[in-house]
């Protein structure tokens, strides 16, 4: 399938302004968040033969990306979220079977997550696919700690036996009376900020109104569910790699430590 990987990068984040240009230090030195996301996109693109572009409405981000050799597509400031930005890029760039949205704040996304998504799309039966990662104790504790501190952090997902998404939330779901107990056996799935869309589903998305659930949670994928569209959750494996997203400034040292850990696995 002809595949395009789009990395949405927005300057005016309410929780973390100028986030794509934040410096993230690893064993390879200091690089910006968007540069590390670009590297993640390129690693996936090489595995599946996909083209990679950064989508932004900000000239500062565009100039920076072009400065390190990345490709940029300018999108409108009216885009409500990354999915709408991807829809603009897909419309401007022509005919692709699958468009992958690799979040600009998720530089730790390993390439096999994208490979697994594209494989799920090739099997048919869904217009949108997204990965979910079963939390280990440390990840679940980190999600709960964010909520206890009043921070909007990672997203969790619940889904049916056939993989059809039931709901996504910034809260830690499913609820369990023992949710804060170290030995809680309830599985919690961290939703990874990565999507694969068929071109038709992506074309329809900007035409739909923002529903109450999307507005409440601030999660773009809920628009598909509110329109009765299936979102297929693909369970992925970490393979000992650590994963986290940069949602807040406090996440930078966490991600830096994980970059160092993941580099030691190579």
Image: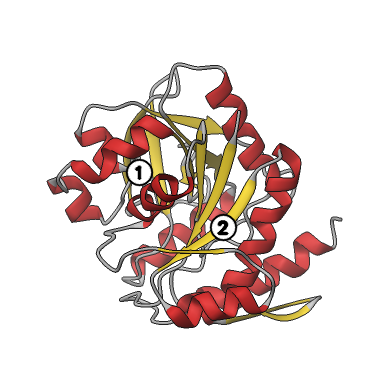
Say which of 230 and 97 sits in front: 97
Residue 174, how many percent across, how many down?
Answer: 35, 39
Question: Is the residue marked by circle 1 packed among few (<14), some (14-19), or many (20+) residues within 10 Å?
Answer: some
Question: Is the residue marked by circle 2 packed among few (<14), some (14-19), or many (20+) residues within 10 Å?
Answer: many
The C terminus is located in which quarter?
bottom right
Residue name at image x 51 percent, y 75 percent: 62
Mark 2 vs 1: CB contact within 8 A:
no
Disc sitting over residue 173 in the figure: 1
Residue name at image x 18 percent, y 54 percent: 215
Say which of 181 and 143 sits in front: 143
Is residue 195 in view from this perspective? yes
Residue name at image x 39 percent, y 40 percent: 157
Kind of element beneath mark 2 = strand
The N terminus is located in which quarter?
top right
Disc sitting over residue 120 in the figure: none
Q: Nearer the viewer, mark 2 or mark 1?
A: 2
Kind of element beneath mark 1 = loop
Residue 106, how many percent across, how many down?
Answer: 55, 60
Disc sitting over residue 53 in the figure: 2
| Quadrant of the rendered image containing residue 30 | bottom right
On screen, residue 258 above or below 82: below
Apparent side of residue 86 relative to residue 67 in the rendered image (left or right): left
Question: Upstream in the sequence, badge 2 or badge 1?
Answer: 2
């Amino acid at each position: 399938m002809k595949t395009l990987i789009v990395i949405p990068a927005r300057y005016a984040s309410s929780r973390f302004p100028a986030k794509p240009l934040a410096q993230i230090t690893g064993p390879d030195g200091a690089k910006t968040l968007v540069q590390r996301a670009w590297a993640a996109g390129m690693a996936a693109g090489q595995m599946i033969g996909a083209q990679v572009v950064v989508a932004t409405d900000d000239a500062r981000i565009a100039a920076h990306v072009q400065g390190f050799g990345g490709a940029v597509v300018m999108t409108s400031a009216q885009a409500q979220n990354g999915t709408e930005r991807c829809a603009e890029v897909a419309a401007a760039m022509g005919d692709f079977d699958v468009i992958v949205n690799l979040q600009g704040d998720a530089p730790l996304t390993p390439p096999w997550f994208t490979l697994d998504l594209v494989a799920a799309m090739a099997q048919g039966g869904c217009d949108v696919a997204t990965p979910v990662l079963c939390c280990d104790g440390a990840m679940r504790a980190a999600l709960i700690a964010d909520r206890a501190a009043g921070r909007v952090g990672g997203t969790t997902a619940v889904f049916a036996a056939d993989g059809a998404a039931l709901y996504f939330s910034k809260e830690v779901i499913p609820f369990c009376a023992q949710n804060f107990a170290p030995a809680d056996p309830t599985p919690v799935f961290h939703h990874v900020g990565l999507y694969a869309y068929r071109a038709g589903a992506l074309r329809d998305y900007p035409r739909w109104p923002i529903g109450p659930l999307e507005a409440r949670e601030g999660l773009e994928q809920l628009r598909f569910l509110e329109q009765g569209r299936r979102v297929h959750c693909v369970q992925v494996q970490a393979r000992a790699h650590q994963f986290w997203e940069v949602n807040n400034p406090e996440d930078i040292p966490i991600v830096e430590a994980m970059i160092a850990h993941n580099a030691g696995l190579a």
